[in-house]
Image (tube, helix red, strand yellow):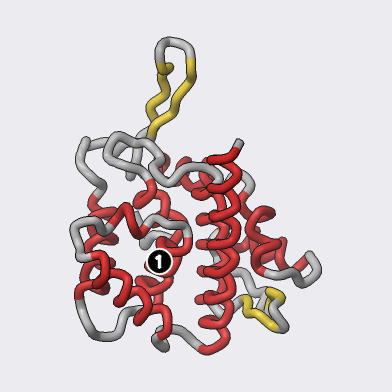
């Protein structure tokens, strides 16, 4: 498979070896919407002005998932990042999972729990974690255990996993305080352009608000 999008990487990290979503819904949906916005920010297509997300370059990137989102953003009025999360999230998990199945990274298994409740899982075809997922995890671990600069995409992915609360599930073998301190350091470092960094910071805050609200709603309903 060619280079993964942040959406692909987030899905691979969110699903366990048995093919179950350990992040939950709608947290995964919101996280994927945030990943799309992160990609657009890193590509120099969007930035935040007066706390509103604006399209600065409508040129297509050549990736349907991103280009469709860019078209939606360009056609709509400027909104705060948090107001785009829900709009962009619709159907994203299924679309990203379909793509990973089509390329053979994951496989789809459908059955019924207790012969009644339908269930769909997305395990690896080999039974072991996909090689691309292992590479992503190793890249993130190196960034967290090192002291030097981190490339923009790895930093963006770490920012994304933290925003949706997935970091606590991924790095349990690493010292908790070390992970927190390194995450803080990466979050404030100059790993992207000033405009992209500002947009990414706003999106991270928006994701935290959206996912926290989703968790509260789930636990109180």
Name the residue located 32 percent from the left edge and 52 percent from the top edge: 169
Disc 1 is placed on an element classified as helix
Name the residue located 39 percent from the left edge and 59 percent from the top edge: 4
**Residue 64, position in %: x, y?**
58, 57
Q: Could you classify mark 1 by the number of other residues whose Cα lies within 10 Å: few (under 14), some (14-19), or many (20 or more)?
A: many
Q: Nearer the viewer, residue 218 or 84?
A: 218
Q: Which residue is mark 1?
A: 157
Q: Splitting the image into 4 quarters, where does residue 91 fall?
A: top right
Q: Is residue 18 left or right of 146 when viewed as pictured? A: right
Q: Is residue 172 left or right of 106 when viewed as pictured? A: left
**Residue 68, position in %: x, y?**
65, 58
Q: Is residue 153 left or right of 94 when viewed as pictured? A: left
- Hey, which residue is sitting farthest front in the picture? 220
- Please, is residue 207 above or below residue 16 in the view? below
**Residue 74, position in %: x, y?**
74, 69
Name the residue located 29 percent from the left edge and 85 percent from the top edge: 149
Counting every numbered tag in the picture gives 1
- Hey, which residue is sitting farthest right in the picture? 77
Quadrant containing the C terminus in the rendered view: top right
Quadrant containing the N terminus in the rendered view: bottom left
């Amino acid at each position: 498979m060619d280079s993964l999008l942040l959406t692909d990487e987030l899905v691979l990290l969110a699903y366990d070896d048995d093919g179950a979503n350990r992040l939950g819904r709608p947290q995964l949906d919101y996280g994927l919407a945030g990943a799309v916005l992160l990609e657009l920010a890193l590509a120099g297509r969007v930035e935040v002005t007066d706390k509103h997300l604006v399209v600065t370059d409508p040129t297509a990137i050549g990736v349907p998932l991103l280009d469709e989102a860019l078209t939606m953003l360009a056609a709509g009025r400027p909104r705060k990042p948090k107001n785009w999360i829900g709009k962009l999230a619709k159907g994203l998990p299924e679309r990203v999972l379909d793509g990973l199945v089509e390329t053979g990274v994951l496989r789809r298994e459908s059955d019924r729990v207790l012969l009644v409740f339908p269930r769909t899982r997305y395990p690896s075809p080999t039974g072991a974690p996909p090689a691309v997922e292992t590479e992503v995890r190793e890249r993130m671990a190196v960034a967290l255990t090192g002291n030097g600069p981190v490339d923009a995409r790895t930093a963006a992915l770490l920012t994304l996993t933290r925003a949706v609360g997935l970091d606590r599930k991924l790095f349990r073998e690493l010292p908790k305080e070390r992970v927190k301190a390194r995450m803080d350091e990466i979050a404030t470092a100059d790993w992207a352009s000033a405009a992209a960094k500002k947009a990414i910071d706003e999106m991270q805050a928006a994701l935290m608000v959206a996912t926290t609200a989703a968790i509260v709603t789930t636990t109180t309903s």
